Image (spheres, rainbow, N blue to C red):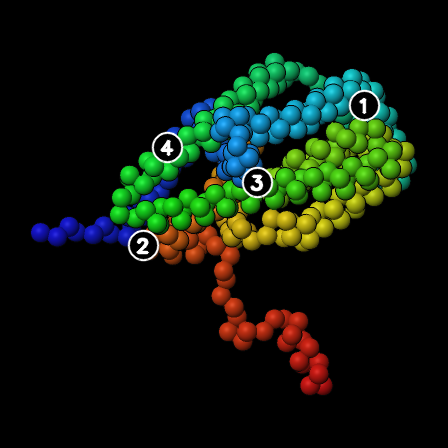
Amino acid sequence: MSESKLHPLQFFAYALISIALFLYLMNIGAFILVPLVWGVFFAFALYPVSKWLESQLFPRSIAIAISIVCVTAFGAAIVYILVNQMVLLLSDIPEMNTLLQEKMDIYWAELQTTFGIDNNLIREKLQSIEWFADGNLNETLFNTGKSITLIGIIPLYIFLLLYYRDFFVAFLLKVSSKRNEAILKWVADAGKVIHAYLIGMVKVTFFVALLSGIYFYFFGIKYYLLFALFIAILNLIPYVGVAISSILVIFYVFLTSDTIFAPVLTLAVLWGIQLIENNLITPLVVGAKVKVNVLAVLLAVLIGGAVWGISGMVLFIPMVGVLKITFDSIPSLQPYGYLLGDDFPKPKNGQSFIKNIKEKWLKK
């Protein structure tokens, strides 16, 4: 007796329930899964370095340790700069409160003179607000300690994943005894996507930090290193990160400058850097390794942020790329891989809008 197939609505309902349950489990297991996934991704990124050191007759454990120490030292230097600059910025909070109140007085006076507005009650309410309060300090410290704990576990995961990589490959081969070539190809393709994405984003982060840091330094912004690194790191979060970091930096420039020209110029420069990064730097250094369309990336950022916070916003993009590779390798799931990809069908006429305009203009 043949098994009856599920109705499409039943299949769709089961799929939604499975996805919701999967995301819920990922959410409640974030404390374990987030450092593990970071460890997997960094293990793929550091694998070429470790492999090269092993080819130079270094023992595997020492080769892995050297690669991890180098990356950790670089990350620790960045964290030190950020913390040092942030401590200095926090010490300026009382002065920034004063500057904000003074600017509010100035703009309220100009509005009253220009439009005849006399709303002292609203102005007094705004002046009574503690804009840079530290009421959530305990929660911030708790979250910081939790993040430091997670960061401390990641190097251990990286070491163990790289050290036992042959063991994991053998496990995959045993699980798929009849599809060894397909499994190895899937692992290789997934590793290429993760490696290309992480290395490419490190290069993009460096270029964005360099460009914005040069502008902040020559423009005379006090904490230029902090703001340059802040913008570059948040740039890892597509669409959302740049907007948040730019608003905060522009707000600081607005407080510490005497004219409206400074924040407007900062907005224009940051927007220009973003255009260069999106249209020139990222296509060159990242390329088309993560072949996922913009809609899928946006959904990955939103879902990742809801499930794992900032880590999810960064990690879910290459995870979607790996998911697409998985779908493409399974014939029955290839349509879903196509749905995630960026291989759009060309228009029937096969011509672009600009080319059509040129032809119409030449006919005249």
**Whole-number angstrom distance, CA of label 4 to CA of label 2:** 30 Å
- Amino acid type at circle 4 is Phe
Q: Earlier in the sequence, mark 2 or mark 1?
A: 1
User: Which badge, 4 or 2, is on the more N-terminal residue?
Assistant: 4
The amino acid type, in three-letter code, at marker 2 is: Ser
> Alpha-carbon neighbours of circle 3 within 10 Å: few (<14), some, or many (≥20)?
many
Up/down of 180 relative to 149, above or below: below
Q: Upstream in the sequence, badge 4 or badge 3?
A: 4
Residue 284 or 59: which is nearer the viewer? 59
User: According to the image, label 4 marks what residue?
Assistant: 167
Residue found at the very far front of the displayed protein: 57
Which residue is label 2 attached to? 332
Residue occupying the point 53% across, 51% down: 289
Q: Position of residue 103 (x, y in %)?
A: 85, 29
Q: Label 3 belongs to which residue? A: 198
Answer with left or right where residue 176 lies relative to residue 145.
left
Give the foreground label among 2 and 1: 2
Q: CA distance from mark 4 to mark 3?
A: 24 Å
**Local SS, label 3:** helix
* Residue 118 image-quadrant placement: top right
Question: Which residue is denoted by mark 1 in the rendering?
Answer: 96
Say which residue appears at 79% left-offset and 45% top-offset. 269
What separation in Å lies between label 2 and label 3 (alpha carbons)?
Answer: 30 Å
How much space separates mark 2 and mark 1, taking CA atoms? Answer: 59 Å
Crowdedness near tag 1: few (<14), some (14–19) or many (≥20) residues, C-alpha within 10 Å: some
